[in-house]
Each structure stands twice: as structure tokens, then as C-alpha cells.
Image: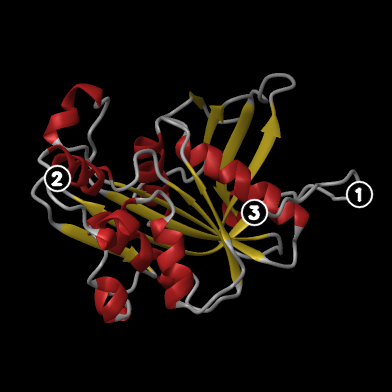
């Protein structure tokens, strides 16, 4: 396993600019809305596409949209992963039926970035993160640190989540339907939207927008998508998660 240290010589970036984004939002009726640079499922190689479930296809389609080539690091985050497939495999195991090797390989938490690396023939590597309700914020923190360690290399953050099966209904704490979001983050300055962070050492300035306290990953993902597509104004948004205050904004807003 490779590890990286961030030395004192590494300068924290002022912001992580969103060079590209893609999203898939599923409604209660199962209808999908594809946004940003999301590719169609036919863009996923057929041999890989047939093995993926709904969560995997959503995550890979968004990832390929913002990183079609192997020129960006991958940080994948999902609170539950493909829990529907895992539950199916457990039921087969209890029933004494043979477990599908292909199904098992697709049920692991890092399936999405693994398949994405195969599809784009990349050997850069990836990281998979799960952090309960703060999964998306934890993924952003990992992506930020990777940009700090290697500012010359973009980082693609992919978040994907599907509703839990009925068997796990008692563990649900807010079902917003299926959601997938991919952000291509760059340390280089650019136009459009950006993310920045500030360690919680004092309160925000009086002119700052209200700060959301530890929003859930599902809610946060959809709020970011709404701002990226221009459905919500003002575009600036702040939230706090595990001692870090995050800010989402745009170059135009910062200039004004």
C-alpha cells in the first residue's frame, strides 16, 4: 500500500476549482435526470456495463464524463456502496445457494473507481471512502489533500448513493432517491465554481452566508448540483463538517 506525506513545504491551495461536473438524479418513480458532462451508459464498455448495477452505472457514467482519460486521480465516496447487491448475496448464502463470483466482485466498496480505471485504461490509482452521513464532506477533504500533495494532477471526486432496500428501512434517515455526482477538481485557477475550506478557528465573518451544520451527504450532493446547474441563487453555500468549514461559490460571486 502506498502512502503519501504532506510536508510543511506543501502550500494549501486557495481553492479547488471545479473544471467539470456531472450528475445523475433519480426521482421517486425511478426516472433519471442526467446533468452536466454525464455520458450515456453506452459509453461504458459493454463487458463492464453488463456487470454493473444501477449505482455502479451511475457512478461510472458521471466519472467518465469528467475524466474520460487516465489523467486524474480518483476519490470515490459512498455511504453504503451497492448494498442491494450485497443483501442479495447474503440471502443466497443463507439459502445455501452458490454465490456468484462476479456478483461478489461487484459488491465491494471500490467497484466504481475500479471499473472506471479499467474503462479509461488508467493506472493512477484510487481511494474509496465511507463516513456515515458525512461521507461526501470526507471525500472532499481527501480530494483537497491530494491536490495539496500533487497540485499538478487533477482529482475527480465521485459520490454515488442509492436508497437502501426495504429490509434495511429502519436505518434510513432521509431517502432522497438515487444520486451520483462527479467533480473534476483542479488546483489551477479557473473560471466558474470553486470550493474552499477553512479550519474552524473562529467564527465566520458577518457578511458570510449561513453555515449548514453537518448536512448529510445525500442532501449536500443535491444542493451542490442545484447550484452547479443554476437552479438556486445566490450560488454561494457554506457548511461545517468535522471541524472544517467549507464554502462553495463562483468566480463571479467572489468578484462582486
Q: What element carries label 3?
A: strand
Q: What element carries label 2?
A: helix
Q: Which residue in the structure is indicated by mark 1?
A: 9
The color scheme shown is: secondary structure
Residue density around tag 2, few if under 14, some if 14–19, many if 20 or more, within 10 Å = some
Residue at 13% x, 56% y is: 31
Q: Nearer the viewer, residue 64 or 113?
A: 113
Residue density around tag 3, few if under 14, some if 14–19, many if 20 or more, within 10 Å = many
Circle nearer the viewer, 3 or 1: 1
Q: Which residue in the structure is indicated by mark 3?
A: 16
Q: What element carries label 1?
A: loop
N-terminal label among 3 and 2: 3
CA separation in Å, label 3 and label 1: 19 Å
N-terminal label among 1 and 2: 1
Q: In this view, does 142 lie to the left or right of 79?
A: right
Residue at 73% x, 19% y is: 202
Instruction: Write down the quadrant of residue 124 in the picture.
Output: bottom right
Residue contact between numbered discs 3 and 2, judged by CB atoms under 8 Å: no
Q: Nearer the viewer, residue 167 or 43?
A: 167
Q: Indicate whether 51 appears above or below 164.
A: below
Q: Indicate whether 72 appears above or below 229.
A: below
Q: Which residue in the structure is indicated by mark 2?
A: 92
N-terminal label among 3 and 1: 1
Amino acid at each position: 500500500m502506498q502512502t503519501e506525506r504532506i510536508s510543511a513545504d506543501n502550500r494549501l491551495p486557495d481553492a479547488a476549482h471545479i473544471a467539470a461536473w456531472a450528475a445523475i438524479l433519480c426521482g421517486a418513480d425511478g426516472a433519471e435526470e442526467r446533468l452536466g458532462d454525464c455520458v450515456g451508459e453506452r459509453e461504458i464498455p459493454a463487458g463492464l456495463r453488463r456487470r454493473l448495477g444501477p449505482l455502479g452505472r451511475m457512478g461510472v457514467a458521471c466519472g467518465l464524463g469528467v475524466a474520460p482519460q487516465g489523467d486524474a486521480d480518483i476519490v470515490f465516496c459512498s455511504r453504503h456502496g451497492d448494498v442491494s447487491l450485497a443483501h442479495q448475496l447474503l440471502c443466497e448464502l443463507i439459502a445455501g445457494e452458490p454465490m456468484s463470483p462476479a456478483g461478489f466482485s461487484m459488491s465491494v466498496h471500490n467497484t466504481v473507481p475500479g471499473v472506471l480505471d479499467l474503462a479509461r485504461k488508467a493506472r493512477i490509482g484510487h481511494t474509496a471512502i465511507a463516513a456515515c452521513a458525512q461521507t461526501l464532506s470526507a471525500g472532499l477533504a481527501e480530494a483537497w489533500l491530494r491536490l495539496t500533495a500533487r497540485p499538478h494532477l487533477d482529482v475527480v471526486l465521485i459520490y454515488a448513493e442509492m436508497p437502501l432496500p426495504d429490509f434495511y428501512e429502519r436505518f434510513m434517515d432521509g431517502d432522497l432517491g438515487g444520486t451520483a455526482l462527479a467533480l473534476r477538481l483542479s488546483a489551477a485557477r479557473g473560471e466558474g465554481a470553486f470550493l474552499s475550506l477553512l479550519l474552524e478557528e473562529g467564527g465566520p465573518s458577518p457578511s458570510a452566508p449561513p453555515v449548514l451544520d453537518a448536512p448529510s451527504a445525500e442532501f449536500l450532493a443535491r444542493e451542490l448540483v442545484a447550484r452547479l446547474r443554476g437552479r438556486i441563487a445566490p450560488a454561494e453555500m457554506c457548511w461545517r463538517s468535522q471541524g472544517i468549514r467549507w464554502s462553495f461559490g463562483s468566480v463571479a460571486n467572489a468578484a462582486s
